[in-house]
Image: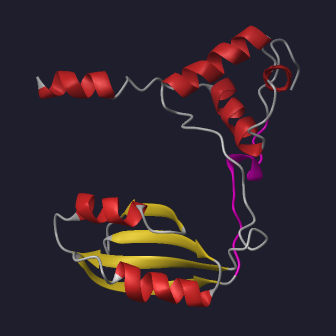
Amino acid sequence: MAREQMAEQDPEVRPLDAIDRTILRLLQEDGRASIRSVAERVHVSRANAYSRINRLIEDGVIRGFTARVDHERAGQGASAYITLKIVQNSWRTVREQLITLPGVAHIALVSGDFDVLLLVHTADNRTLRELVLTRLQAIEDVLSSRTLLVFEETDLVVGDRAEPAPRPPGAVP
C-alpha cells in the first residue's frame, strides 16, 4: 500500500532527450522566453515546444519560473553560507523552523562534518549577526553553527556552460 501511494506522488521519471535539455537551458537563461522563440531555437514546431514544456512542468522537472536577483543591488549586501550540526533525526523539525527565517535562500541536508547547509542573504552584517546568534541558536535541535561570509558570488545556469543547440533534421555538421 505504501509503495502504491509513493507511486501516485512521484510520477515516473522520463528520460530527457537533447531537445528537452536545450529547452531547459533556454528557459534557465530566460524564463520569459516565448514558446515561439524556444521552438525556433530548438528547431521544432510551436505545438511540440508547448507540449514539451508542459510535460516538463507536469513531470516536476520544471518547478517554477523565477528572476535571477543581484542581492547587493536589492538591498541584501551581506550573504553567507551557514553550516549547522543538529540533533540526530531532527531534520524535519529543524527544516520547518529554518524555512521561516528571513533571508534564507537555500536549505540542504548534507553529509560530512555538518548536517545542514544554508545560504542566507541579509541587509548587512548586523542583521546577519542577529540571524545567526539569536534566531539560529534559539532552535532547540541546533547543536552548533559555522558562518562563512560570501565576498563575491556568481550564479550559474546551464546556459553559462554553452551546449550546442540540436541541429535541425538533415543539417550538415
Q: Quadrant of residue 155?
A: bottom right
Observer able to see residue 27: yes
Q: Position of residue 15 (x, y in %)?
A: 50, 25
Q: Quadrant of residue 73?
A: bottom right
Residue plotted at (82% across, 17% down): 168
Q: Is residue 53 above or below residue 63?
A: above
Q: Main secondary structure of the magenta part?
A: loop
Residue span colored magenta: 152-164
Q: Is residue 117 above or below residue 148?
A: above
Q: Residue furthest right?
A: 172
Residue plotted at (56% across, 26% down): 56
Question: Split into 4 quadrants, where in the image is the N terminus?
Answer: top left
Q: Position of residue 163 (x, y in %)?
A: 75, 41
Q: Quadrant of residue 52?
A: top right
Q: Position of residue 146 (x, y in %)?
A: 41, 86
Closer to us: 110 or 128: 128
Magenta stretch encompasses residue 166: no
Q: Is residue 99 above or below residue 11?
A: below
Q: Position of residue 55 (x, y in %)?
A: 56, 19
Q: Residue furthest left?
A: 1
Q: Is residue 16 above or below residue 75?
A: above
Residue plotted at (69% across, 51% down): 157
Closer to us: 169 or 45: 45
Residue plotted at (70% across, 16% down): 50
The image's colour scheme reads secondary structure
- Is 84 left or right of 22, judged from the image as shown? left
Observer able to see residue 146: no
Question: Split into 4 quadrants, where in the image is the C terminus?
Answer: top right
